Image (cartoon, helix red, strand yellow):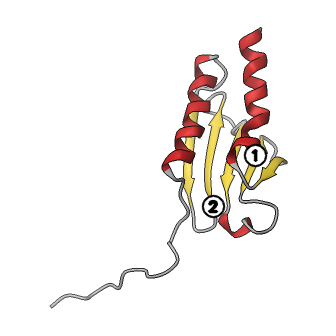
């Protein structure tokens, strides 16, 4: 007959964004696109992290990466905002405060 492959039980095999988290991130992305600053994005799901990367142009490094790492939940927080060179700009337990620097940048772009 055939072989039976067991389903993974317990811990999920990859980290993902919940619907409300992804909605909040995509809302910010849409506003940055409307302001003419971002043009592309990529999403990566891995065993350790889920990453949303926003690009100014498609052929370059992402301007910002929003990372969700549940393993850091009890330490410095599972959310991180990483810039183009890989430096962590903001880290926290909640998504809203981590997105605040990008929100402020959006306000400057719209105000110009």
Q: Secondary structure at mark 1?
A: strand
Q: Residue at x 63, y 17 (%)?
A: 36
- Furthest-left residue in view? 1
User: Which residue occupies the foreground of this view, 98 or 44?
Assistant: 98
Toward the bottom, the furthest residue is 1
Q: Residue 90, percent across and down?
A: 82, 46
Q: How crowded is the residue under tag 2: few (<14 C-alpha within 10 Å), some, or many (20+)? A: some
Residue 81 placement, left or right of 6: right
Residue depicted at x 63% and y 67%: 48
Residue 107 drawn above or below residue 72: above
- Residue denoted by label 1: 81
Whole-number angstrom distance, CA of label 1 to CA of label 2: 13 Å
Residue 110 located left or right of residue 58: right
Q: Which mark is residue 49?
A: 2
Query: Residue 93: x percent and y percent?
Result: 74, 56
When asked about the image quadrant of residue 7, the answer is bottom left
Horizontal and vertical percent position of residue 60: 68, 35
At a point 75% along the width and 44% down the height, the residue shown is 98
* Front position in the image: 37 or 58: 37
On-image quarter of the N terminus: bottom left
Could you classify mark 1 by the number of other residues whose Cα lies within 10 Å: few (under 14), some (14-19), or many (20 or more)?
many
Q: SS class of the residue under badge 2?
A: loop
Q: Is residue 33 above or below residue 11?
A: above
């Amino acid at each position: 007959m055939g072989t039976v492959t067991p389903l993974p039980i317990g811990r999920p095999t990859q980290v993902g964004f919940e619907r409300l988290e992804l909605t909040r991130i995509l809302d910010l992305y849409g506003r940055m696109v409307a302001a003419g600053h971002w043009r592309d994005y990529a999403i990566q799901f891995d065993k350790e992290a889920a990453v949303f990367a926003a690009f100014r142009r498609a052929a370059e490094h992402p301007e910002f990466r929003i990372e969700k790492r549940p393993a850091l939940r009890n330490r410095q927080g599972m959310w991180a905002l990483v810039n183009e060179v890989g430096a962590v700009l903001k880290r926290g337990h909640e998504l809203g405060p981590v997105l605040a620097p990008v929100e402020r940048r959006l306000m400057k772009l719209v105000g110009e």
